[in-house]
Image: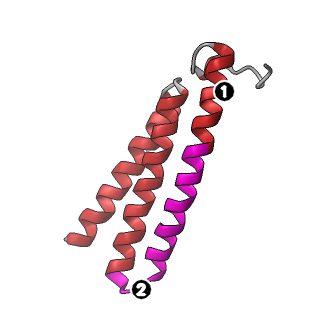
Amino acid sequence: MEMTLTYLIGIITFAIGAFGVLIRKNAIVMFICIELMLNGANIIFMGVSKFKGLIEGQVIVLFIMAVAAAEAAIGMAIITAFYRRRGGVEVDKADLMRW
């Protein structure tokens, strides 16, 4: 029961993030949804790692968290530069990334 609940929470979290990326047009909201997808994957990795008694899942989660931190810094810098150039963060304004 516990393992099924962990999978379910991870899948729902990932699905909400994927749905948000596909539906929203605001770059900041899309960025947050991508982070939500990463966290959903982390929940599943941790659940499998605990269930199987292996440490590899925890190592992968640590790696994903490090990559997410770097992605957050670079992503917010790109979104800030885009906002300064275009005056908004709507992805519809990004036509072939021409400035």
Relative depth, front residue between 43 and 64 = 64
Disc 2, SS: loop
Magenta stretch, main secondary structure class: helix
9 up-or-down from 6: above or below: above
> Residue at 80% of width from left, 21% of height from top?
98
Which residue: 48% across, 28% down? 23
Vertical side of 67 occupied by 21: above or below: above
Element type where label 1 sits in the image:
helix
Amino acid type, label 1: Ala
Q: Dot 1: within a 10 Å radius of its alpha carbon, few (fewer than 14), some, or many (20 or more) residues?
A: few
> Label 2 is placed on what type of residue?
Leu
Residue 52 lies, in percent from the top left, at 37, 84
Point 53% across, 53% down: residue:
69
Q: Position of residue 4 (x, y in %)?
A: 27, 67
- Residue 71 in magenta stretch: yes
- Number of numbered discs: 2
Where residue 54 is drawn, which disc sits there?
2
Lower sequence index among marks 1 and 2 = 2
Q: In this view, which residue lies farthest toward the top?
A: 87
Foreground disc of the pair 1, 2 = 1
* Above or below 98: residue 75: below
Q: Position of residue 64 (x, y in %)?
A: 52, 62
| Quadrant containing the C terminus in the rendered view | top right
Residue 45 included in the magenta stretch of the image: no
What colour scheme has been applied to the protein in the rendered image?
secondary structure
Marks 1 and 2, how far apart at CA: 42 Å
In the displayed structure, does residue 71 sit left or right of residue 34? right
Check residue 81 in the rendering and tell me which mark sits there, or answer none.
1
Splitting the image into 4 quarters, where does residue 87 fall?
A: top right
Please provide the residue range marked out in magenta: 51-73
> Which image quadrant: the N terminus?
bottom left
